[in-house]
Structure formats: C-alpha cells, structure tokens
Image (cartoon, grey):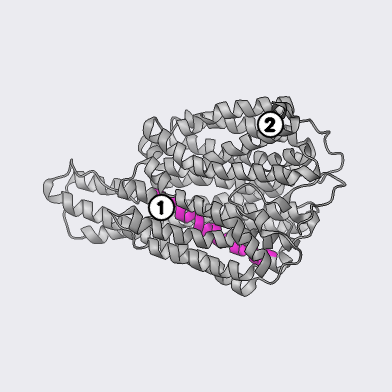
C-alpha cells in the first residue's frame, strides 16, 4: 500500500498510462481502417490520410517536444499533451466525416509529440540515478505491451461495437492520468537557461513533408500532370530545401545537421529510413489485404500480426546483447536481408489463403530479421553521438522512423492504386459492362485492395467482375510487398557497406524496442549537473 502513496511510483504510473494510451492508438488504427472506410468513405486515399496525418504531425514536431519540456517544465508539457490527446480522441470518436477524423488524427500527432518525450522526462525528474534504469525499463515494457493489447482489444471493440470506441476508450485513461499528474508529479521551475524553440524549422518541416504526401495521395485520382499534384509536390520540396538551409544557418536548430557528418550516424539513419519505410508499408497494406480482400474481421486481422510483436519481445534484447559482444555490422546487414526474405514470401499470398501455411511462416521470418536489426541499429546511431547529444540523436532517429513510414505509405499508395486500376482494366478490356457493373468496378478502384459485392450485378457479369477485382487486389498487394522487401534489403546493404565499429559504448539490450517502443535508455535527458549512467 505504501508504494501506492509513493510520489515516485505514481509519477511512473502516470508516465506509463500516458504512453500506453498513445501506444494503443498507434497500433489499433490500421486494424480499424476498413471499418472506418465503410462508415465514412474516403477510399484508399482517406485511409492513407487517417494514418499519415498522425505521422506527419508527430514526425515533424517530436524534435521540439523535448525542448518545450525544458522550457516550460516536463509536468506542464506532459499534462498538456495528455489532456490534448484525450480531447482530440473524443473529436475522432464523434467525427461525422472522414475530413474531421483526419484533422483529429493530425492533432493527436501534435499532442503525441508533446507527450512522448515529456513522459520520459517525468521519470528522469522523479527518480534518482540509481533507480532510474529500472523505472525506464518498466515504462518501456508497458509501452511494448500496448503494441500487443492494441490490435487485440481494438479488433474486439471494432467487431463488437464500432470503430469509434477505439478513440472514445482513451478518455477515462486520460482522466485517470491527469489525476495522477495533479497528485504526484512535481512542478519543476521553468528553465532559466534554454535554447530558443525552433518554431520556424518545425513549421517548414511540417509543411514541406505535407506537400509531397498530399501529391502522392491525390495522384491516383488527379494524375501526375494535374496542377493539384505538381503544385503541392514542388512547393513541398522547396520548403524542405528551405528547411535544410535554415537548419544549417540557425544557431539553435531542431535538426543539428552536423551530426550527419559522422559516418555511423548518417548511415544508421539512412538505414532507419529504409527499414521503417518497409515496415510501415508492410503492416499498413497487410492489414488492409487481410480484411478487405481475404475477408478477415478486425479481431482476426489483429491476431494475425501478433506473432511479429511476440518475436520482437522474445528476441530483440538477446540480439542487442549479441551485437554488444560481436559488433553490430553483421546484425545490421544480415537482419534486413532475412526480413526482406520474409516479405518476399508474402508475395505468395492470395485469396483465399491459409494463415498457418501462407501468412505465419512469412511473418515469422520477417520478424526474426527485424528483431536482429532494430536494437543494434538504434544503439549504433546513438553510439556515434556524444553523450551530451544522445537525447537529440535519439529524437532525430525517432523522427526519421516516423517520416519514413509516412512517405513510404503515401508513395506506395500511388503505385499500388495504379497497378490495381490497370490490372482491372486489362482483365475487363473488350467486355461490355452494365451500368451496375461499371459502378461496382469504379467503387473498387477508389478503395483499392477490395472485394466487390456481385449480388446486384447481372448474372453473366458476376464471375468476370469478381475475378478481375480479386486478381487485381492480389497483384497490387504482391507489388507492395515486393517494394517493401526492396526497401528493407537496401537497408541491409547500407548496414554491411557503411557501418563501422561504434565511437562509444551503447548497449544494444538497452535499445531492444528500437524506435518502435518508447525511447532507448541512452537517450535520457539528464537533469543539469548529472552524468550519464554507466553502460559497461
């Protein structure tokens, strides 16, 4: 009972609860996308924006989230992040249209960028150095558990009630977390010496990324020659170039470009981009394929991807220990190759399929390669930064992981949509279709990775239309997995060719979740005057 009254333990519980809610949402939304699309419409483009709006805001702003904690105090920023995330979760739950839901998801990303780094800062502030490692380990473990619970609980809620409950259920957790913050988390005096917040850099980054993402998502509808595609793409690229110019000139950049002069840091982040881009593609399109083409319900789709999380939990820390002993280069080189082999196996998937002989072996092989890679990769990136830059190095690596998934899903959506439409057109070429069949095919093209209800179609057209849509869905999915495999394999080549022994010791076992779960121990922002914990 005494531990329940201990402010340190209650502060840890508050940090766990806040991060747990964000982790639940991050993992469950992909499972809910088919249900949301059926309810609100929007097709593949709407599904992409629901996922990408969150990643866009989070990836653009997470680098200044920690700086705001230094400026305003981690308690205040953490409370704002938690309260804001809960409020916009309610907006998402009540969204009357896909546009409102997308706006709510973007705001969730904004508040998630405040919550994530400040949760770690709350723990650092509450615990003395000798207790801090265990507290951060508990926080990381519970953040990982959220990745398991999310698809399962979310899948059940979607099937039993409505997708709206995956957002509404956040509210009571948020209220409880705010109560813990008020009771237990101490208010630290605002920092008197702090670097100015790079607001212009964050704005340029967010708008710069939004331009190409908007263009890629709109391209299947408007075409590459449309001003509505070319204009946003060019403006976005110009803003990103301006962002890099600004970061090289400002004395207080959110993205210190000097870190990229270090070989392992630059190569490791390039590998992070390819690996997490492939990872984002895989789980976004696999869940859609299983539900919209194969016919899984939301809970079955959540269960289908669970082995990947279990393998990560069981093997990532062990892979980190082995990389500490033998060096990270082979793990960062061969791990992605194994993961890419698993993705190539997914190119065998069709509809119908057997989960046990078709999906599971490919998923296990992919997860084995991923587990061998993420901890050594994160540790190597951090090891190439000085201890005083470990926090910003981890933040940069985290942001690159989010942006990689954002851009990969947007880009592949355009490719998959084009493949899907051209495949249907080729299959039905020369075959006259009734108005009902033409409408059904047009709706399938808007959704992509779809099945079609043929009950209202003329009997003679049912089999050809159904076969054309299903074959096009399978071909488009296989193309997506092939491109994801190429991205992941490219990461392996980068690791083998570019990585050298780390500059300083960062234990891989302390980075077991990579940037998938919480933050590595080495990335902790220490109170002024404290030295980093020993890692030997």
- Chain part drawn in magenta: 265-287
Mark number for residue 79? 2
Q: Is residue 278 magenta?
A: yes
Q: Position of residue 47 (x, y in %)?
A: 43, 44
Q: In this view, does 151 lie to the left or right of 121?
A: left
Q: Where is residue 208 in the image (x, y as percent from the top left)?
A: 60, 52
Q: What element carries label 2?
A: helix
Residue shown at 57% from the left, 70% from the top: 333
Q: Is mark 1 on a helix, strand or loop?
A: helix
Tell me the quadrant of the picture where the N terminus can be found.
top right
Residue under pointer 1: 286
Quarter holding residue 453: top left
Residue shown at 75% from the left, 39% from the top: 69
Count of labels shown?
2
Q: Does the magenta stretch include residue 110?
A: no
Residue shown at 63% from the left, 70% from the top: 329
Q: Which residue lies furthest to the bottom in this view?
A: 497
């Amino acid at each position: 009972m005494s531990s329940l009254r201990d402010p340190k333990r209650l502060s840890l519980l508050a940090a766990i609860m806040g991060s747990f809610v964000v982790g639940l949402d991050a993992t469950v939304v992909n499972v809910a996308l088919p249900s949301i699309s059926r309810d609100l419409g929007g097709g593949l483009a709407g599904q992409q924006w629901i996922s990408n709006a969150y990643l866009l805001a989070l990836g653009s702003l997470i680098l200044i989230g920690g700086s705001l904690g230094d400026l305003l105090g981690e308690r205040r920023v953490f409370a704002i992040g938690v309260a804001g995330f809960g409020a916009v979760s309610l907006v998402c739950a009540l969204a009357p249209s896909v546009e409102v839901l997308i706006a709510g998801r973007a705001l969730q990303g904004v508040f998630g960028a405040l919550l994530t780094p400040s949760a770690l800062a709350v723990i650092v502030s509450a615990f003395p150095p000798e207790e801090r490692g265990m507290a951060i380990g508990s926080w990381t473990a519970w953040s990982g558990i959220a990745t398991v619970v999310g698809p399962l609980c979310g899948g059940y809620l979607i099937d039993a009630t409505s997708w709206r409950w995956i957002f509404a259920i956040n509210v009571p957790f948020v209220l409880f977390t705010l109560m813990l913050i008020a009771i237990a988390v101490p208010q630290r005096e605002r920092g008197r010496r702090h670097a100015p917040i790079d607001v212009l850099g964050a704005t340029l980054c967010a708008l710069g990324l939004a331009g190409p993402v908007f263009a890629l998502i709109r391209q299947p509808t408007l075409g590459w020659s449309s001003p509505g595609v070319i204009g946003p793409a060019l403006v976005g690229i110009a803003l990103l170039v301006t962002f890099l110019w600004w970061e090289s000139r400002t004395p207080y950049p959110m993205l210190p470009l000097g870190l990229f002069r270090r070989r392992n840091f630059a190569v490791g982040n390039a590998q992070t981009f390819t690996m997490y881009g492939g990872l984002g593609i895989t789980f976004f399109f696999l869940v859609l394929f299983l539900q919209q083409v194969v016919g899984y319900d939301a809970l079955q789709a959540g269960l289908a991807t669970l082995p990947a999380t279990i393998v990560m939990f069981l093997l990532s820390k062990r892979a980190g220990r082995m990389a500490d002993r033998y060096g990270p280069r082979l793990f960062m080189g061969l791990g992605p190759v194994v993961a890419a082999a698993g993705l190539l196996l997914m190119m065998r998937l069709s509809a119908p399929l057997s989960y046990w002989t078709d999906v599971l072996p490919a998923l296990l092989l992919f997860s084995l390669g991923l587990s061998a890679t993420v901890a050594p990769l994160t540790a190597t990136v951090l090891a190439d930064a000085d201890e005083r830059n470990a926090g910003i190095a981890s933040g940069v690596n985290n942001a690159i992981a989010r942006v990689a998934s954002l851009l990969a899903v947007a880009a592949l959506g355009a490719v998959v949509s084009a493949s899907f439409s051209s495949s249907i057109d080729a299959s039905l070429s020369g075959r006259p279709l009734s108005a009902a069949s033409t409408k059904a095919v047009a709706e399938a093209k808007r959704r992509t990775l779809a099945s079609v209800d043929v009950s209202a179609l003329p009997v003679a057209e049912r089999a050809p239309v159904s076969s054309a849509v299903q074959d096009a869905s399978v071909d488009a999915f296989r193309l997506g997995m092939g491109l994801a495999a190429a991205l992941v394999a490219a990461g392996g080549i980068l690791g083998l060719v570019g990585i050298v022994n780390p500059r300083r010791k960062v234990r891989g076992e302390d980075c077991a979740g990579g940037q998938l779960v919480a933050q590595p121990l080495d990335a902790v922002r220490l109170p002024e005057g404290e030295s980093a914990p020993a890692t030997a």
